Amino acid sequence: MNSKLISLSLLGLTLAFSQPGFAIGEAAKPLQQQWAVVKYQTAEKEREKAFEQLAAQAKQVAQQHPQDPEVLVWEAIILSTYAGEKGGFGALGLAKEAKALLEQAEKIDPNVLNGSVYTSLGSLYYQVPGWPIGFGNDDKAEKYLKKALQLAPDSIDANFFYGDYLLEEGRYQEAVTALEKALNAPTRPGREVADAGRRDEIKAKLEQARKRL
């Protein structure tokens, strides 16, 4: 099995209002909050089923708000994380669906959620296998991740995923720099659960990068 199919477990994105004070709409907010609970406070053996249920809920919300780019991004985030929990070739269809949702959100508002579309697309492109299995493309990944950083240079997520991409590429010193910036990113009001979980992930990646210097 292609190793990148297993790396889909990293697709647990937590991207909304990356800058302090950035507000999210009422339609998307429950999805954001429930995502953090399932991702970081649900037992591992129960997580896949919980994300399956949350994905169904997100789809219903998106049907009610088809032109809300925040809802589309959060449905994509949930599907991506569900793909990571599901793993293997079965995850690829979910990743493709997430990509389509992000592209739809980008057409409505490319700057939605402070660059979350670009962080999400970038992370999909480097974690999904390339042709002929999937749509993965490292060049596109870097382009999108850098675009996200232009919009949100201090974002914990944009810096984390760019750092992880650099780690995957063997650019270890650059990875350390990006991951250290992610670790020191401002805390987001109301996102304490997500931020704590993300920082644990950052520390693990930093340890890997530093060992390879």
Image (cartoon, helix red, strand yellow):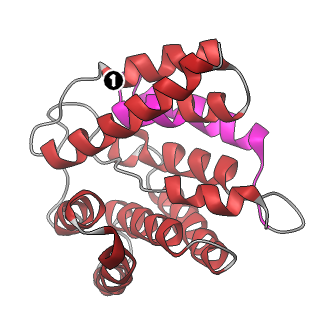
Q: Residue 115 sits in which quadrant?
A: top left
The residue segment tinted magenta is 134-161
Q: Which x, y percent locates residue 148? A: 50, 34
Q: Which x, y percent locates residue 114? A: 36, 39
Q: Is residue 153 above or below residue 90?
A: above
- In the rendered image, the quadrant that contains the N terminus is bottom right
Q: Is residue 35 above or below residue 176?
A: below
Q: Front-most of 42 and 145?
A: 42
User: At 27% from the left edge and 64% from the top edge, which residue is drawn?
Assistant: 35
Q: Which x, y percent locates residue 129? A: 76, 58
Q: Is residue 35 above or below residue 111?
A: below
User: At 56% from the left edge and 34% from the top edge, which residue is drawn?
Assistant: 164
Q: Secondary structure of the magenta portion, mostly?
A: helix
What amino acid does circle 1 point to?
Answer: Leu
Q: Helix, strand or loop at disc 1? A: helix
Q: Is residue 196 found left or right of 78 in the rendered image?
A: left
Q: Is residue 5 found left or right of 33 in the rendered image?
A: right
Q: Which x, y percent locates residue 140? A: 73, 42
Q: Residue furthest left?
A: 190
Q: Is residue 185 above or below residue 205?
A: above
Q: How many marks?
A: 1
User: At 51% from the left edge and 50% from the top edge, which residue is drawn?
Assistant: 120
Magenta highlight on residue 158: yes
Q: Residue furthest right?
A: 132
Magenta highlight on residue 213: no
User: At 65% from the left edge and 52% from the top edge, which residue is drawn?
Assistant: 127
Q: Is residue 150 found left or right of 2 in the rendered image?
A: left
Q: Residue 151 sits in which quadrant?
A: top left
Q: Front-most of 16 and 8?
A: 8
- For label 1, the residue is 183
